[in-house]
Image (tube, rainbow, N blue to C red):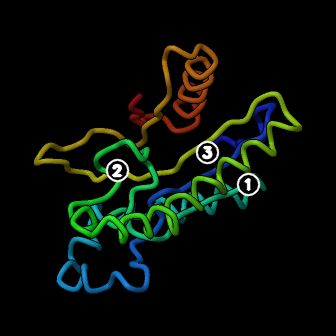
Amino acid sequence: MPDIKSVKSPAIISCEHGGNQIPPGLGHLFKDKHQLLQSHRGWDPGALLLAEKIVARNHCPFVFEKNSRLVVDQNRSLTNNQVLSEITASLSKEQKEKIISGIYKPYRITITTAIENLLKKHRRVYHFSIHSFTPVLNGVIRKADMGLLYDPKREIEKVFCLKLIKRLQDEIPGICIRR
């Protein structure tokens, strides 16, 4: 795996789906949902461990979420209708706001502040958000070892990701990378 230090700007690592914990006061909603919480819908198995290894090797800022994405999905904007799952979407307006203000917003503020602090010292920051794939989605086998999500309209992102793909393929022959 390439050492993120090899890039010439600082990096920040995040893991939005690092756990499947349920915060106090919401356990009753998930009483019969153990299997769902253990599945890829509840979290990204292995993602937090990988993120921790990258951070240990590269000594960069790290922000992670251990609450299940079935409570609130840190990978979605507040305007996305799937920011709350079908389980928490049925809560009262006050309960939803408590989740947003107590879990979602603090995470977002933490990561935004970390990026802003890095940008005070450096011209650019590389944000790597670590996730894992479920090998089968809706009955379809996914043929990827890794995926890189970036905005292809942003030339700097595209060039960086294409170089990273090339380096990974040179170091790990046969790796299948989706983009």
* Mark found first going from the N terminus, 3 or 2: 3
Q: Distance between the residues labelled 3 and 2?
A: 18 Å
Q: Do the residues labelled 1 and 2 touch (CB within 8 Å)?
A: no
Among all residues in the image, which is located at the extreme front? 94
Binning the other alpha carbons within 10 Å of mark 3 as few (below 14), some (14 to 19) or many (20 upward) gives: few
Label 3: which secondary element: loop
Q: What residue type is labelled 2?
A: Phe
Q: Distance between the residues labelled 1 and 2?
A: 24 Å
For the point 49% across and 60% down, the residue is 104
Quarter placement of the N terminus: top right
Above or below residue 75? Residue 100 is below
Q: Are marks 3 and 1 in contact (CB under 8 Å)?
A: no
Residue assigned mark 3: 1
Q: What residue type is labelled 3?
A: Met
**Occupied quadrant, residue 176:** top left
Q: Which amino acid does label 1 sit on?
A: Pro
Disc number at residue 83?
none
Residue 37 pos. (x, y %): 28, 73
Q: Do the residues labelled 3 and 2 touch (CB within 8 Å)?
A: no
Q: Distance between the residues labelled 3 and 1?
A: 19 Å
For the point 89% across and 38% down, the residue is 121
* Mark found first going from the N terminus, 3 or 1: 3
Quarter placement of the C terminus: top left
Residue assigned mark 2: 133
Residue 112 pos. (x, y %): 66, 47
- Mark 3, mark 2: which one is toward the viewer? 2
For the point 44% across and 70% down, the residue is 98
For the point 43% across and 41% down, the residue is 146
Left or right: 82, with 164 as reference point: left
**Occupied quadrant, residue 27:** bottom left
